Each structure stands twice: as structure tokens, then as C-alpha cells.
Image (spheres, helix red, strand yellow):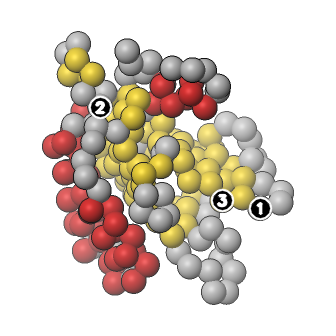
Amino acid sequence: MALSNWATIAFNKDGELSEGIVEIKNKKQSKIVEIRKNWIGVKDSSVSEYNVATIESGKVHVIDFEIYAKRSYQNSVFCLTSYYPKGYAEGSKKKYFAGIGAYAFSGDKEVGVEKRTYKQFIKWIEELAKDNWFHDEEEFKEWFKKIKKYRYKSGYNQGTLYLAKAGFKL
């Protein structure tokens, strides 16, 4: 049984599957980019507990993140985010986070993130990298190589993850 109409596939800074959230923390605040349903939310705890930005498509520089977003199949949003986990300190290496938030149903059947949506997501990152400066960065190349090795699965249901994290046995 699905607990939400939305599914996610996301990759953290190490190119591993993640829950669709990237966070930069320091002693005073927390900055977050999160895939929510089929949009991207950006939070900064020093400003508000609520989103300081909601992104559906385009390119945005907000707080310490550079975010690319695109709409696609399944009423989805694709997200590619670059950031410095320790801020812009000398020697800090840029990291990447990416994912898909998509409508999880086809008719009455839960399908998660469909394979065609996932393939379009990978193609989008490849095209985006060709047109932007980060395609030559070794860090990006290594990270993207890991993502491309991912063996497609339909992702996870956002509602199920939310309740599991809240302690409910599902």
C-alpha cells in the first residue's frame, strides 16, 4: 500500500542512493535542499523553518547551493545541485546531489519512478554537464560515473519514508 502519490530516486555526494535531502550544517544554522513531491524546497534555519525557495524548473543560486531543475515525464522534477559542504573555505571541494521527484502512479497502479523517467534524468545530466563548466571537474566525473552504474529500481514512496523516519513500523 502506498502512503503517498510521490516517489523519489536520489543520489548523495558519494553517488549513493539517498532519501532526497542534502544538508550543510554548521554551529549556527542548517541549509537544506530537499526533493518534495515534484518540486525542490530550499531551507535556511537562520531565516525560517519554512522554505526560503521553491523551485520547479530552471537554474538558481540560492544560499550556498547552485541548483538546476527540469520538468519531465510523470509530472516529475529533476534536480542537480552543487555545493561546498564546509562552505567556501580554501581547499573545500565541491560536491553534488541529484534526484527525481515523480508522480508514483499510472492509473491505479503504483509504478514509482518509471524507467523512462530515470533514463531521461541521466540524459539530462549528461546534456547539462556538456553545456556547463563543471563537466571537466574530476569530482563531478567520478560522482556521475557512480550514478550511471546504478541498476534501475523504481525508487521509494515519499510517504512511506516519512512515516518510517517518524518511528512507525510499516
Gap between marks 2 and 1 measured at Cα: 34 Å
Residue wearing tag 3: 24
Circles 1 and 3: CB atoms closer than 8 Å: yes
- Residue 3 falls in which quadrant of the image? top left
Q: Residue furthest bottom?
A: 91
The residue lying toward the viewer, choosing from 157 and 97, is 157
Q: Position of residue 127 (x, y in %)?
A: 22, 66
Q: Position of residue 85 (x, y in %)?
A: 62, 67
Residue at 57% x, 20% y: name it.
169
Q: Position of residue 68 (x, y in %)?
A: 40, 57
Residue wearing tag 1: 26
The residue lying toward the viewer, choosing from 16 and 158, is 16
In this rendering, the label closer to the viewer, 2 or 1: 2
Sequence-first tag of 3 and 2: 3
From what the image shows, is residue 134 above or below residue 47? below
The numbered mark at residue 112 is 2
